[in-house]
């Protein structure tokens, strides 16, 4: 193989490693099944991080809508001393939200609904 081929292989490997590390769920973010989430979500701050349009199509009863796109500006609305339960449509946005809350608000306990709102079987409000 040529030097150029090796350089491309190394660059591709580095890009893949970066993507995998970046997408990894933080250790402090608990993934809860629907049943586990249902057990304690009423004792926590329930935050729907989907966009307002998604929220209005239906959301978990008792959830507050703080979209991920607004979370940095609205983080003061979340108490760091009380557990935070997050959910989005599929669970993908929760890692980003958790990182922000841990870093900026030092929230002690953060959990998210594994599989997101799509997997929810409890009461919803439309």
Image: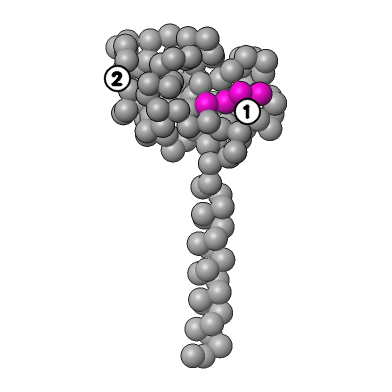
Give the magenta range. 107-111
Q: What colouring does the structure picture have?
A: one colour
Q: Secondary structure at mark 2?
A: loop
Snapshot quadrant of residue 70: top right
Disc ID at residue 101: 1
Percent coordinates x, y for residue 2 in the rendering:
51, 90
Q: Secondary structure at mark 1?
A: helix
Q: Residue at x 32, y 11 (%)?
A: 123
Q: Mark 2 vs mark 1: give the one in front.
A: 2
* Quadrant occupied by the C terminus: top left
Disc ID at residue 121: 2
Snapshot quadrant of residue 74: top right
**Decide: marks 2, 1 in contact (CB < 8 A)?**
no
* Frontmost residue, 36 versus 28: 36
Q: Main secondary structure of the magenta part?
A: loop
Q: Residue at x 51, y 21 (%)?
A: 85
47 left or right, relative to 107: left
In the image, residue 107 above or below residue 115: above
Q: Is residue 21 magenta?
A: no
* Frontmost residue, 33 versus 62: 33
Q: Residue at x 29, y 19 (%)?
A: 121
- Give whichever of discs 2 and 1 has the lower sequence position: 1
Percent coordinates x, y for residue 42 in the rendering:
47, 9
116 left or right, relative to 5: left
48 left or right, relative to 107: left
């Amino acid at each position: 193989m040529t030097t150029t081929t090796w350089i491309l292989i190394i660059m591709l490997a580095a890009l893949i490693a970066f993507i995998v590390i970046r997408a990894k769920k933080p250790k402090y973010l608990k993934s809860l099944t629907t049943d586990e989430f249902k057990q304690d979500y009423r004792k926590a701050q329930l935050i729907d991080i989907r966009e307002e349009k998604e929220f209005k199509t239906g959301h978990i009863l008792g959830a507050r809508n703080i979209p991920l796109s607004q979370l940095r500006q609205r983080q003061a609305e979340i108490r760091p001393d009380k557990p935070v339960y997050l959910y989005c449509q599929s669970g993908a946005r929760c890692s980003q939200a958790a990182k922000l809350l841990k870093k900026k608000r030092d929230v002690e306990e953060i959990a998210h609904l594994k599989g997101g709102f799509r997997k929810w079987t409890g009461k919803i409000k439309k």
